[in-house]
Amino acid sequence: MELFYIIMFFILGTVLGSFYNVVGYRLPKGESIINPKHSYCPSCHHKLETFELIPVISYLMQKGQCRNCKEKIALFYPLIEVLTGLLFSVCYYSFGLGYELIIALTLVSLFVIIVVSDTKYLVIPDEVTLTSSVVIVITMLISIGIKETALHVLSGLAMFFSMYMIMLFGNYLFKKESLGGADVKLMFVVGLVVHPLIGFFVIFVASAIALPISIVLFQINNEKVIPFGPFIMLSVILFYFLKVDVKSLIEYLTFI
Ligand SMILES: [Zn+2]
């Protein structure tokens, strides 16, 4: 039975992952994400049939190319679908059925969309951050009540405003944009799901993961700007999944 659910969540993940590809790819360009009739090959604009829209499987059946123009379909898209499927399974495996599962799935979904939009356009659409925040707040309201939810929202605001101040300070110091406004808005989501104190560790871990990867990308790709959003999300997901709480964090810190 457990395995059945894990597989179901994997399939659900690949289907939604395919939708998140569309969201991350089209929303920053201001295109419609709802009308499936408008799914097309980005190269020849050939409209995709239903059987060309099955996650992963259609990619494999078409041997990774468009049926019409034979243009190669980037491996990035099926990889995103598989990644979402795997993450959804891990969410179910870690949290079982319950409100924490909904929050975990929301965080994972936000992560995947940001990976697509931030690596493609260096943009995180506000709609995505806002929708995720609303889903998380409603889930909390239903499960833990108004009082507890208010604390989580306050924590989110605290996180948002402290990052906003850091951004202003950084801009003043370096006389240019040091931190993206979208990353600051993302910190609201971080504060929503973890304690503000842990929020700062989220930033620290995100930077620690981003640094070596940026250095490698600088070397091989000569990329000048590396999006930070995906690393923030990856880090907060780690903290959320490992269920790190403030008490054990402080105990650990005083131990060293
Ligand atoms: Zn084509």
Image (tube, rainbow, N blue to C red):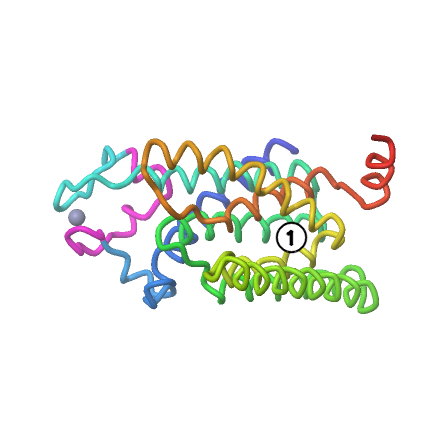
Please determine whether, in this image, residue 31 is positioned above or below residue 111.
Answer: below
Is 213 in front, or is 98?
A: 213
- Compared across the picture, whether 20 is left or right of 222 comes to right
Q: Which residue is mark 1?
A: 102
- The structure residue drawn at horizontal position 28% and vertical position 62%, both measured from the top left corner, is 37
Q: Quadrant of residue 8?
A: top right
Question: Where are the magenta residues, as a range?
Answer: 41-60
Give the side of residue 178 with respect to residue 224, left or right.
Answer: right
Image quadrant assignment for residue 157: bottom right
| Closest to the observer, 185 or 221 | 221
Label 1 amino acid? Ile
Query: Is residue 37 rendered to the left or right of residue 178?
Result: left
Crowding at mark 1 (Cα within 10 Å: few <14, some 14-19, many 20+)? some
Towards the viewer: 165 or 8? 165
Task: In the rendered view, tell whether residue 226 sits above or below residue 127.
Answer: above
Quadrant in the picture for the C terminus: top right
Rendering coords of residue 219 (x, y %): 36, 32
**Could you say which is closer to the camera, residue 220 or residue 19?**
220
Q: Does residue 239 belong to the magenta stretch?
A: no
Q: Residue at x 32, y 36 (%)?
A: 221
The x, y position of residue 200, in whole percent, is 69, 49
Q: Main secondary structure of the magenta part?
A: loop
Where does residue 23 sit, x and y in percent of width and height?
Answer: 40, 58
The quadrant in which the N terminus is found is: top right
Whether residue 4 is situated above or below residue 113 in the rendered picture? above
For the residue labelled by badge 1, is the local secondary structure a helix, a strand or a loop? helix
What is the x, y in percent for residue 213?
47, 35
How many numbered tags mark residues here?
Answer: 1
